[in-house]
Amino acid sequence: MLAALLKSGESAQVVDVESLVAGTWGGTGPWCERTGPYLRQTVSRARTALSSDIAKSTEYAARSAPAVAALSPAARADVLERASRLAAGHRSGLARLLALELGKPVKDGGGEIDRVADTFAVCAAEARRIGGETLPIAGWARGVGDTAFTHRAPLGVALAITPFNAPANLLAHKLGASFAAGNTTIVKGPPQAPATTTAIVALLLEAGMPTEAVQLLHGDGEVGAALCAAPEVAAISFTGSSATGNAVARAAGAKRLVLELGGNAATLVCEDADIVEAATACARTGFSNSGQSCISVQRVYVHRSRYPEFLDALREAVGRLRVGDPLDAATDVASMVDETAAQRVVDWAAAASRDGAQILCGGTREGATAAPTVVAGPPADARVVTEEIFGALVAVLPYDDFDTVIADLNAGRYGLQAGLFTHDIRRIVTAWRELQVGGLVVGGTSNYRLDHVPFGGVKDSGFGRETPRSMIDDFTSVKTLTLRSLSVWGTQTTTPQKGPK
C-alpha cells in the first residue's frame, strides 16, 4: 500500500485509497474525490465509510484491545522506532503527497515529515518509560502493614480524528502515543488528505504495527460523530475547529477527551525588540502553510514607538516570500486548502479595510492561492482580530502599555499560544504569568512548536496537552494494587516509650 501511494505521488496519477477495517483494506462505500487546490486536478479518491464499516471497526477494536495491550512496551517502542526511520527514508515522497493533496510547499511538507520521524521516535522513548509508583501508604496509621503500587493500564480503544493542515504529524502524535500506551486505535482522517493519512497508517504497518492495533476510516463529520458516540471507544483525541470540538464533546459523552482546537494567536513586539528579526520571523511563520495553523501568527501587537518601523520591515520581508507551485522547492507560499478558504482571506481583509484598516500587501487571490496579506491598524472588533482566519493574513496593531495589551489579549475567546519579542525579564515573567494561553514563546512568534514539549490551550482553544508523554497519560488509566498484611515498610505502629533513667 505504501509503495503504491508514493508511486502515485511521483507520477501525479489519481490514487484510490480504501478503508482499513478489521485487518483488511477495502470497503463498499461511495468514492469521494480530492481535488488538489493548486493544479485543480483530482489527486486521490477515498472510500467513504458506511455505517456497517463503523460497526465492524468498533467491534473489531474491542476484540483486539487485549492483544495489543499484551505487547510489551519494548515491542511497541521497536515498531515506533522503525516507523521513525521509514518516515525519514520516505521524506520526499510523503512531502510530495502533501503538496499534491493540500498545496503545501514541499519545503514545508518535508519539514512536517521530519517532525513525523521525530514524533515516532519520542513516542518510542515514552513507551519505554511507562511505569508506576510504590505508594507511601505506611505514612498513615491505617496503611501500616500493607503495600500499594500503581501502574498505567491501556484504556482499550482510542479514536484519533485528525485535521487537514498537518495530517501526517498530528496523526503521528495521536496514533503513535495511543499505540505506545498499548491501545488499539481507530483513525478518522481528514477528507482533504486521504492519501497522506493512508500513507502514514501503511508506513506503521510496514514497520511492524499489528493490524489489530489500527483501523482507518474515511469520511465526513457524520462518520466522525458516529465513531465518537460508539460505546467501545474509551478515549478521543481531536484536532480541529472549536465548533467541531464542541460537537465531538457532545457526541462523545462521558469519554476521555483531548481537544486541540482553534486560535487566533498573537505575537507581542516590545520597544526593545530587534525589529528586523521580529518582522522577518512574523513573515516567515505567519505565512508558512498559507497561515493554516492554529498557532500561525494572525495578530502582531507592536509598541507604538516602533510601529512604523515594524510595518516597513514586515512589508519588505513578506515581499521576499516566493509564491507559486508547491512542488517547487523554492516556493514559500502556495495554495490554501480550497478556493473558499482563499476567498475568506480576501473578504476579511476587505472588511477590515472598509472599517479603516490599511492593506499593506495582498488582499487578492488566484484560485486557491491567497496572496500573503498584511492588514495594518484594524479596529479591535474586526474579524481579523477577534476570530480565527486560518489563512494567509497577518493583522498588525499598535499598543501603548504592556499591561493593557496583555488584558486586551486575555479578553478574547482563544488561548492557545503567544509569542513575545523583548529582552526585559520582568515582561517575560509577567507575560508568562498573566497571559491566558497554553504556551508562550520568547524570542520567537506564536508559531513554534517542539513535538516533545506539552502543547495545548485554554478557553475555546481546548484542553489536554498533545505531546507523547501527556497523551500517554490521557490514553491510560491508573490501576492500583494493594497487598494486605504484606509490607515493605516498618510495621510497628507506636513509638516505644522509655522510662526515666
Image (cartoon, rainbow, N blue to C red):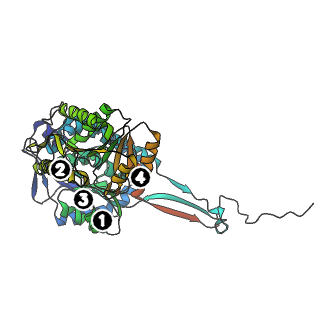
The tag earlier along the polypeptide, 3 or 1, is 3
In the rendered image, which quarter is residue 81 located in? Answer: top left
Question: Few, some or many C-alpha atoms within 10 Å of disc 2 (few <14, some 14-19, many ≥20)?
Answer: many
Question: Few, some or many C-alpha atoms within 10 Å of disc 1 (few <14, some 14-19, many ≥20)?
Answer: many
The tag earlier along the polypeptide, 3 or 2, is 3
Instruction: Tell me the amino acid under the disc marked 2.
Output: Pro
The tag earlier along the polypeptide, 2 or 1, is 2
Image: 56 above or below 356: below
Q: Which residue is mark 2?
A: 194
In the rendered image, which quarter is residue 138 located in? Answer: bottom right
Numbered-mark total: 4
Quote the CA–CA distance across marks 3 and 2.
Answer: 19 Å
Element type where label 1 sits in the image: helix
The tag earlier along the polypeptide, 4 or 1, is 1
Q: Which residue is mark 4?
A: 470
Q: Which residue is mark 3?
A: 22
Please state which of the two labelled residues, at mark 3 or mark 1, is closer to the viewer.
1
Element type where label 3 sits in the image: loop
Image check: 309 left or right of 78?
left
Quote the CA–CA distance across marks 2 and 1.
Answer: 24 Å
Q: Which residue is mark 1?
A: 249
Task: Examine the rendering and report whether any part of residue 282 can be seen.
Answer: yes
Element type where label 2 sits in the image: helix
Residue 323 position within the rendered picture, expressed as x and y whole percent measured from the top left:
14, 35
Task: Examine the rendering and report whether any part of residue 457 can be seen.
Answer: no
Question: Few, some or many C-alpha atoms within 10 Å of disc 4 (few <14, some 14-19, many ≥20)?
Answer: some
